[in-house]
Image (cartoon, rainbow, N blue to C red):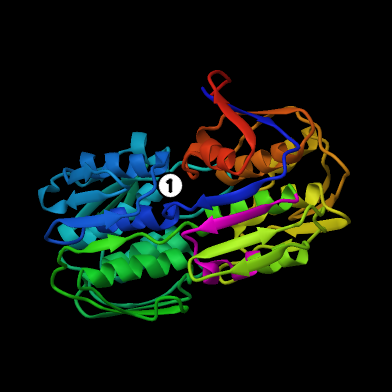
Amino acid sequence: MDKLEIQGGVRLDGEVRISGAKNAALPILAAALLPHATLQIRNVPRLHDVKTMIALLDRLGAGVTVGENCQVEVDPTSTCEFTAPYELVKTMRASILVLGPLLARHGRADVSLPGGCAIGARPVNLHVDGLRALGADIEIEGGYIRARADRLRGARIVLDTVTVTGTENLMMAACLADGRTVIENAAREPEVVDLAGFLTAMGARIAGAGTDTLVIEGVERLHGCDYEVLPDRIEAGTYLVAGAITGGRVRARNARPQHLDAVLAKLRDAGATVTVGKDWIEVNMNGRRPMAVDIRTAPHPGFPTDMQAQFAALDAVAEGVGTVVETIFENRYMHMLELRRLGADIRIEGHTAVIHGVDRLSGAPVMATDLRASASLVLAGLVAQGTTEIQRIYHIDRGYERIEEKLGQLGAHIKRVPGGSH
């Protein structure tokens, strides 16, 4: 397995182009199973998770053509299999997103219970309960969710907790249901709004995207469309923190500032000068050391859990003491132990991490445990003295497109080398 080697101590300076959003591309690809026609999806990031979703669509019989320039064409009319097998689902939890579309379009779906990240329980019961409310017969047996329905019927669904993939699955299923569906306590993330935009472009009737109440009027069928995936706000946030942690200046192009309000507020708190345009964001530390910031994760529009690890790295070298409170996933502090190997002063008390900023981190071998944890280790490596070697970087490749090339454009001394353990 490859690993990343980083020679720390370089102040980043430059601009980087942000790729399409992984967390929007995956549900949009799943939703491509719904229409009765071919469609085009543009700005699809080249990531391992996206390849897995394309392999799953292919396995289901859909025709998928991956073109140049991040374009994917999907012809769902040849779909003839309705099982998402364990060997694909176990590597990526987002595979469960084919459950709603298969059930709504074909009346049946057998989807393996998901594997995926090591960041705690993400129950599928909200998906199952919601689909049952729409009239599906569902059994869970042999490690599979087995769902059947002649035609789904509109219903009022109140989600117990805010769930992004649950909201997406139920919204996709409701598009072809008979009558009106109301989803309350729905997720408000930009990626949910993007999926609603894609469904609407295919003829779905959805109101309330971006609020906590979705109203979906079911239609008989959906048609093809040409749609562009929104930029990845988490990738943008990660590179902006890379600029801040190194005392440098980074401009993220093809980014939407309105999707990063909570993150940009914290970067300002850390002492960065933040400027924005219609489709770009720039962070400039003017050579200064960042100030410690307090983070508390929350569903959108609160501070995103997917940016928690990156700010933990920033706090590790900041002036002062910062606290990080994780409210979304119970097992999302594994990167803290690896940051300690680089010399970070971190104390964990339940769901709170107290981070005393140190003057310097020292390079060491570390191991990525999940996608965003690996991003925090890369950021820490950028400021650590000496060489930091990050193993198990297949986690990084699930969510960051060519991270070593993009950081290299900003001046980082980073390279991918063969070796390391899987």
Q: Quadrant of residue 103?
A: bottom left
The kind of secondary structure element at disc 1 is helix
Q: Which residue is mark 1?
A: 93
Residue located 70% across and 39% down the image: 382
- Asked if residue 48 is positioned above or below residue 146 in the image, the reply reads above
Whether the magenta-drawn stretch holds residue 104 is answered as no
* Residue 333, x across and y down, in percent: 69, 46
* Residue 373, x across and y down, in percent: 63, 43
Left or right for 54, reference 35: right
**In this orientation, which residue lies closer to the viewer: 277 or 305?**
277
Residues drawn in magenta = 247-263
Residue located 22% across and 62% down the image: 226
* Residue 290, x across and y down, in percent: 80, 55
Q: Amino acid at mark 1?
A: Arg
Whether the magenta-drawn stretch holds residue 253 is answered as yes
**In this orientation, which residue lies closer to the viewer: 109 or 235?**
235
**In this orientation, which residue lies closer to the viewer: 111 or 386?**
386
- Asked if residue 365 is positioned above or below residue 288 in the image, the reply reads above
* Residue 305, x across and y down, in percent: 61, 58
